[in-house]
Image (tube, rainbow, N blue to C red):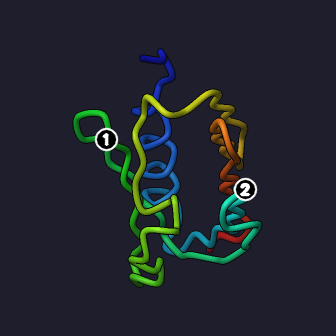
Amino acid sequence: MNNFNFQKVTKILNKNLDRHEVVKYEIIESFQKNGERTYQLHNLAAEVEDDMLFFKDIEEILPTDISYVLNGFLVSSVKDLIIGENIIKIYFKDGHIIIKAIIWS
């Protein structure tokens, strides 16, 4: 089990929602199995439940296809977590997810 603070991820996303009416995020998922894909979501939220981290967006654009890792993953599968001012980087054994706030109003 790792000691990364995923509650901090949920707090950052919630703080963005509290401060801005709309927050647009660019998501980059890069994994050996599915390659790299980039997509955008609005008003992203996250929830930690047991050993899982789940993401959702207000417009429900995030595909429910399980190949989109942002839908949910085991917290214990994370190898590194980097949290910056407007960016969250989550690293796994076989790839990574980058969540970047790009526009807010």
The spot of residue 81 in percent (x, y) is 63, 31
Residue lying at 39% horizontally and 66% vertically, measured from the top left: 56
Q: Residue furthest left?
A: 50
Q: Is residue 5 above or below residue 91?
A: above
Q: Amino acid at mark 2?
A: Gln
Quarter of the view holding residue 100 = bottom right
| Residue nearest the observer in this picture, 95 or 62 | 95
From what the image shows, is residue 24 above or below residue 72?
below
> Which amino acid is tagged 1?
Val
Quadrant for the N terminus, please. Answer: top left
Quadrant showing the C terminus: bottom right
Counting other residues with Cα less than 10 Å from the Cα at mark 1, is it few (<14), some (14-19), or many (20 or more)?
some
What's the residue at 65%, 28% (across, down)?
80
Label 1 SS:
strand
In this rendering, would 79 be left or right of 87? Answer: left
What percent of the width, then of the height, locates residue 17?
46, 60
Observer-nearest of 95 and 102: 95
At mark 2, the secondary structure is loop
The reply to whether dot 1 and dot 2 touch (C-beta < 8 Å) is no
Image disc number at residue 86:
none
Residue 24: percent from left, percent from top: 62, 72
The residue where tag 1 is placed is 48
Q: Where does label 2 land, which residue?
A: 32
